[in-house]
Image (spheres, helix red, strand yellow):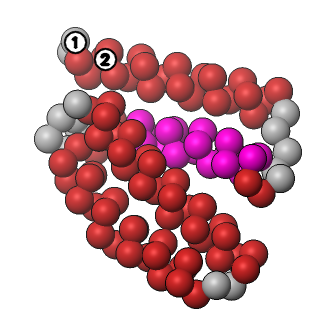
Amino acid sequence: MLLGLAFAVSVIETVGLTMITSYSKTHFLPTMLGAMSIYGLAVPMFIYKTLNYAGIGTVNFMWNIMTTVSMIIIGTLMFGEKLDRLHMMSMVLGMSSIVLLYFAERYA
C-alpha cells in the first residue's frame, strides 16, 4: 500500500510539474490553474493517506525519487531535454534506494 500511495503522489505531482513546464513554454493560463489545483488539492490528500503507512521522511523520499525519475523521462520525451549515462545511472540508483527503503520500513 505504501508504494502504491507514494506512486500515486508521484504521478499526480508529475502531472502538475508537466503542466507547469508546459505553461512556461506556452503561457496558456488554464494549464497553470490546473497545476495549482493539483498541488493544492490532490497532492496533500494522497500524502495524508500515505502517512498512515510510514513516516514523513520515508514518504517524502519515495515520492521525490519517483517524481524525479518520471520528470527526467518526461523532460526527455516531451520537452527534448538531453539524457546521458549519468542520468540513467542516477535513476537506477534512485529506484534501487526506494526498494531498499521499502524493505527497511516493511521489516523494521
Picture quadrant where residue 23 is located: bottom right
Q: Which residues are magenta?
A: 61-77
Query: At 42% across and 17% down in the image, what residue appears?
Result: 100
At label 1, counting other C-alpha atoms closer than 10 Å, the crowd grade (few under 14, some 14-19, many 20 or more) is few
Q: Amino acid at mark 1?
A: Tyr
Image coords of residue 50 (percent x, y)? 23, 43
Task: Note whether residue 104 is visible.
Answer: yes
Q: Relative to 95, does residue 12 appear above or below in the rendering?
A: below
State the predominant SS element of the stretch in magenta. helix
Q: Nearer the viewer, residue 54 or 50?
A: 50
Task: Note whether residue 57 is visible.
Answer: no
Left or right of residue 88, residue 95 in this image: left
Secondary structure of the residue carrying tag 2 is helix
- Identify residue for label 1: 107
Query: At 85% across and 45% down in the image, what residue appears?
Result: 82
In the current view of this chain or complex, which residue is farthest to the top?
A: 107
Query: At 83% across and 53% down in the image, what residue appears?
Result: 80
Quadrant into which the N terminus falls: top left
Q: Amino acid at mark 2?
A: Ala
Query: At 29% across and 69% down in the image, what residue appears?
Result: 41
Picture quadrant where residue 93 is located: top right
Q: CA distance from mark 2 to mark 1?
A: 6 Å
Query: What label does residue 104 carry, if any?
Result: 2
Image coords of residue 19 (percent x, y)? 58, 68
Residue 67 is covered by the magenta coloring = yes
Asked if marks 2 and 1 touch (Cβ < 8 Å), the reply is yes
Quadrant into which the C terminus falls: top left
